[in-house]
Amino acid sequence: MKTVFYFAVALAGGAAIGAATVQSIHAQAKPPVYMIAQNEVSNLDAYVKEYSVKSQASARAAGGRPLILGGKATVLDGTPPETRTVVVVWDSMEKLEAWYHVPETQALREIGKKYATFHVFAVEGVPQ
């Protein structure tokens, strides 16, 4: 009888560990989300000082990881965009939206709108 009891406990423990492992693996397979902004900037100095630096710090604090922050574009085909491109990667759409829709972020955007026209969208990437 003792053997059956120990076997049942071991079986239940193994099932719990297996379920936790599967959950962990599933969470890792979630694709990243890329926020892409192509901003038409009218006053670059004011845009950087009053908006960009603060927005970047806010996004980093909320879990965003910048990949592109208005770097030099090399045209491979077509006409180059006359915009400042920003790409920030997020772990999930929920984290991006949680940061984007808070009053502090929206207040920063109002400041930024004095110096730029925003074109912002999010794209789901492929699982890593």
Image (cartoon, rainbow, N blue to C red):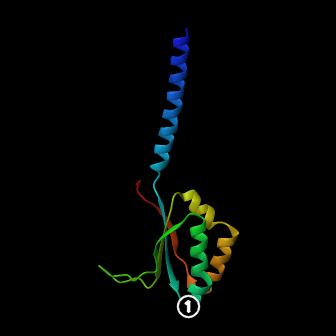
Residue 109 falls in which quadrant of the image?
A: bottom right
**Quarter holding the C terminus?**
bottom left
The N terminus: image quadrant: top right
Q: Is residue 16 above or below residue 70?
A: above
The residue singled out by tag 1 in the image is 45
**Nearer-the-camera pick, 18 or 125:** 18
Q: Position of residue 68 (x, y in %)?
A: 45, 74
* Quarter residue 125 falls in: bottom left
The reply to whether residue 113 is in sight is: no
Q: In the figure, is residue 61 to the left or right of 103? A: left
Q: Secondary structure at mark 1?
A: helix
Q: At x 62% / y 86%, what residue is drawn?
A: 114
Residue depicted at 55% across the width and 11% down the height: 2
From the viewer's side, name the closer residue of 57 and 72: 57
Residue displayed at 51% across by 33% down: 17
Residue at the right extreme, as displayed: 103
What amino acid is found at the position of numbered circle 1 in the picture? Asp
Above or below, 13 against 6 in this view is below
Q: Is residue 88 visible?
A: yes
Q: Position of residue 113 (x, y in %)?
A: 61, 82
Relative side of 81 to 99, left or right:
left
Left/right placement of residue 70 relative to residue 60 reads left
Looking at the image, residue 28 lies above or below residue 58: above
Q: Give coordinates of residue 99: x percent, y percent.
A: 62, 65
Residue at the extreme left? 76
Q: Nearer the viewer, residue 21 or 77?
A: 21
In the rendered view, does 92 fall on the left or right side of 99?
Answer: left
- The spot of residue 71 in percent (x, y) is 42, 81
Residue at x-position 53% and y-position 27%: 13
- Above-or-below relation of 19 to 26: above
